[in-house]
Image: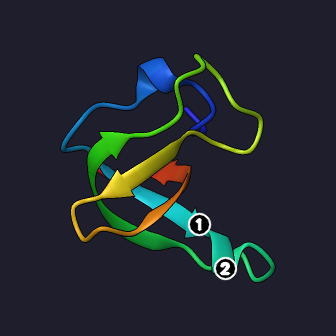
Protein backbone atom coordinates (compact mmCIF):
# COMPACT_ATOMS: atom_id res chain seq x y z
CA UNK A 1 0.00 0.00 0.00
CA UNK A 2 1.53 3.27 -1.13
CA UNK A 3 -1.35 5.75 -0.96
CA UNK A 4 -2.14 5.66 -4.68
CA UNK A 5 -5.32 3.54 -4.41
CA UNK A 6 -8.46 5.10 -2.98
CA UNK A 7 -9.75 1.67 -1.84
CA UNK A 8 -6.77 1.33 0.57
CA UNK A 9 -7.76 4.47 2.51
CA UNK A 10 -10.48 4.45 5.18
CA UNK A 11 -11.91 7.21 7.37
CA UNK A 12 -10.14 7.44 10.75
CA UNK A 13 -7.01 5.74 9.43
CA UNK A 14 -3.62 7.11 10.56
CA UNK A 15 -1.62 8.30 7.55
CA UNK A 16 1.35 10.43 6.58
CA UNK A 17 0.66 13.12 3.97
CA UNK A 18 2.70 15.69 2.08
CA UNK A 19 1.13 19.15 2.13
CA UNK A 20 1.20 21.32 -1.01
CA UNK A 21 3.76 23.69 0.53
CA UNK A 22 5.97 20.74 1.55
CA UNK A 23 6.12 19.05 -1.87
CA UNK A 24 9.60 20.40 -2.58
CA UNK A 25 11.03 19.07 0.71
CA UNK A 26 8.89 15.93 1.02
CA UNK A 27 8.15 16.71 4.70
CA UNK A 28 5.46 14.33 5.98
CA UNK A 29 2.62 15.43 8.27
CA UNK A 30 0.81 12.74 10.28
CA UNK A 31 -2.83 12.51 11.31
CA UNK A 32 -6.20 10.77 10.96
CA UNK A 33 -8.20 10.83 7.73
CA UNK A 34 -11.34 12.96 8.10
CA UNK A 35 -12.34 13.08 4.43
CA UNK A 36 -11.14 11.58 1.14
CA UNK A 37 -11.02 14.34 -1.47
CA UNK A 38 -9.86 12.44 -4.59
CA UNK A 39 -12.79 10.90 -6.49
CA UNK A 40 -10.83 8.74 -8.94
CA UNK A 41 -9.90 5.17 -7.86
CA UNK A 42 -6.15 5.88 -8.24
CA UNK A 43 -3.76 8.82 -8.45
CA UNK A 44 -0.03 8.61 -9.30
CA UNK A 45 1.00 11.19 -6.66
CA UNK A 46 -1.24 9.82 -3.89
CA UNK A 47 -4.88 10.19 -2.91
CA UNK A 48 -5.71 13.65 -1.56
CA UNK A 49 -7.26 13.66 1.93
CA UNK A 50 -8.19 16.09 4.69
CA UNK A 51 -6.88 15.24 8.14
CA UNK A 52 -8.89 15.76 11.34
CA UNK A 53 -6.60 18.78 11.98
CA UNK A 54 -7.92 20.36 8.74
CA UNK A 55 -4.68 19.96 6.77
CA UNK A 56 -4.97 18.75 3.16
CA UNK A 57 -2.39 16.73 1.31
CA UNK A 58 -1.60 13.54 -0.60
CA UNK A 59 -1.14 10.22 1.20
CA UNK A 60 2.45 8.98 1.13
CA UNK A 61 2.43 6.35 3.89
CA UNK A 62 0.23 4.44 6.29
CA UNK A 63 0.87 4.43 10.06
CA UNK A 64 -0.04 1.47 12.27
Query: Circle 2 sits in a helix, a strand or a loop, which is it?
Result: helix
Q: Quadrant of residue 18?
A: bottom right
Q: Which residue is mark 1?
A: 18
Query: Residue 33, position in %: x, y?
Result: 29, 49
Horizontal side of 49 relative to 34 (left or right) equals right
Q: Determine crowd level at label 1: few under 14, some 14-19, many 20+ residues with C-alpha closer than 10 A.
A: many
Residue at the image position 52 percent from the left and 24 percent from the top: 39
Query: Residue 15, position in %: x, y?
Result: 38, 54
Circles 2 and 1, Cβ within 8 Å, touching? The answer is: yes
Q: In this picture, is 24 found above or below 12?
A: below
Q: Which residue is mark 2?
A: 22
Horizontal side of 16 relative to 21 (left or right) equals left
Quick one: 43 or 27, which is closer to the camera?
43
Residue at the image position 24 percent from the left and 71 percent from the top: 53
Q: Quadrant of residue 1?
A: top right
Query: Circle 1 sits in a helix, a strand or a loop, which is it?
Result: strand
Q: In this picture, is 52 found above or below 21?
A: above
Label 2 – label 1 distance at C-alpha:
6 Å
Amino acid sequence: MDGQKRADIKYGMNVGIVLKEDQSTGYITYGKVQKILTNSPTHPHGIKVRLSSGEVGRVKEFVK
